Image (tube, rainbow, N blue to C red):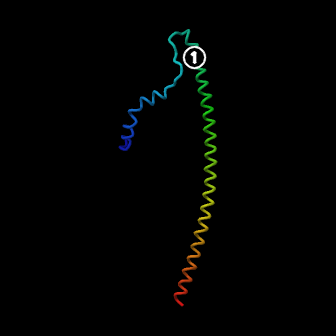
Amino acid sequence: MPTWLWPAVKLILPHVGNIVAAAKPAFTRKAGDPAEQAGVVQQQIAELQAAASQNAAHIKELAEQLRLTVAALEQGAVDTEKRMRRASTLSMSALVIAVLAAGLALYAATT
């Protein structure tokens, strides 16, 4: 294992228990009685369906946010490209003027 990874592992290791506890499903657990298990299974199915529909809603929301972000990035890229063209044109104009000024100064110095 690379030596740079050890400090990260040492920082994360104390929090692994909390992470696992938070990531555990909070669904209803099966009871020991077989007669009650049918009701518990139905409750678990309902909980899973509710969680799946919530996930679908969150995914749709994230997809919309991603679409808006990509559109903003594309617009920013177009604006930046226009600015770069303008800056390039300005710098080329400045270069031409500088070369003409240097030529004129050289001509004036020699005459």
Q: Which residue is drawn at 61% across and 53% down?
A: 76
- Image quadrant of residue 36? top right
The one of 83 and 40 positioned closer to us in this rendering: 83
Q: Name the residue under label 1.
A: 41
- Image quadrant of residue 94? bottom right
* Above or below, comparing residue 75 to residue 18 in the picture: below
At label 1, the amino acid type is Val
Residue 60 at x, y percent in the picture: 63, 36
The one of 3 and 84 positioned closer to us in this rendering: 84
- Image quadrant of residue 44? top right
* Above or below, comparing residue 28 to residue 91 in the picture: above
Q: In this rendering, would 7 be left or right of 68?
A: left
Which residue ends up furthest to the bottom in the rendered image? 111
Residue 41 at x, y percent in the picture: 57, 16
Q: In which quarter of the image is the N terminus?
A: top left
What is the total number of numbered labels drawn onto the structure image?
1
Residue 11 at x, y percent in the picture: 38, 37
User: Does dot 1 land on a helix, a strand or a loop?
Assistant: helix
Q: Residue at x 61, y 61 (%)?
A: 83
* Above or below, comparing residue 101 to residue 1 in the picture: below
Q: Residue at x 51, y 18 (%)?
A: 29
Q: In which quarter of the image is the C terminus?
A: bottom right
Residue 49 at x, y percent in the picture: 61, 24
Q: Residue at x 62, y 64 (%)?
A: 86
Q: In this rendering, would 8 be left or right of 106?
A: left
- Neighbor class of circle 1 (other Cα within 10 Å; few <14, some 14-19, many 20+) is some
Q: In this rendering, would 76 be left or right of 8?
A: right
